[in-house]
Amino acid sequence: MPKLKLSEILDDKPVKVTVELPAKLHRDLVAYAQVLGGETGNPITDPVRLIAPMLERFIATDRVFAKLGKHPIQILHGG
């Protein structure tokens, strides 16, 4: 079986954010957590903990975003 893009969930000081997910996305998140837990041997009891690492991975692998450098908002807004 191919490896998932996420490898582990690191503990870090969180910032509380409230978000609403479509039901299908939440079901997929729960399923992903089950597969990842089986793959790593560490069951994930709260699939919501996957959201931050998924977003980090997405941003880290976005080539266009990386090309913008350290200050993408200033570049996008002409600052």
Image (spheres, helix red, strand yellow):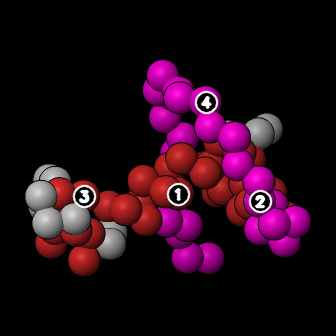
Q: What amino acid is found at the position of numbered circle 2 in the picture?
A: Leu
Mark 1, secondary structure of its residue = helix
Determine which residue is flagged by label 2: 21
Residue 4 belongs to magenta span: yes
Mark 4, secondary structure of its residue = loop
Q: What amino acid is found at the position of numbered circle 4 in the picture?
A: Lys
What stretch of residues is rendered in magenta?
1-26
| Residue 1, quarter of the rendered image | bottom right
Give the CA distance from mark 1 to mark 2. 14 Å
Give the CA distance from mark 3 to mark 1. 21 Å
Q: What amino acid is found at the position of numbered circle 1 in the picture?
A: Met
Crowd class of label 1 (few under 14; some 14 to 19; many from 20; radius 10 Å): some
Determine which residue is flagged by label 3: 73
Left or right of residue 16, residue 59 in this image: left
Where residue 28 appears, as percent x and y from the top left, is 78, 68
Give the CA distance from mark 1 to mark 4. 16 Å
Q: Residue at x 62, y 37 (%)?
A: 17
Determine which residue is flagged by label 4: 16
Please report whichever mark, 2 or 4, sits nearer to the chain's N-terminal start: 4
Please report whichever mark, 2 or 3, sits nearer to the chain's N-terminal start: 2
Task: Answer yes or no: is residue 60 visible.
Answer: yes
Of 17 and 10, nearer the camera is 17
User: Which one is closest to the eye, mark 1 or mark 4?
Assistant: 4
Give the CA distance from mark 2 to mark 3. 26 Å
User: Which one is closest to the eye, mark 2 or mark 3?
Assistant: 3
Give the CA distance from mark 2 to mark 4. 16 Å
Of 63 and 38, nearer the camera is 63
Q: What amino acid is found at the position of numbered circle 3 in the picture?
A: Ile
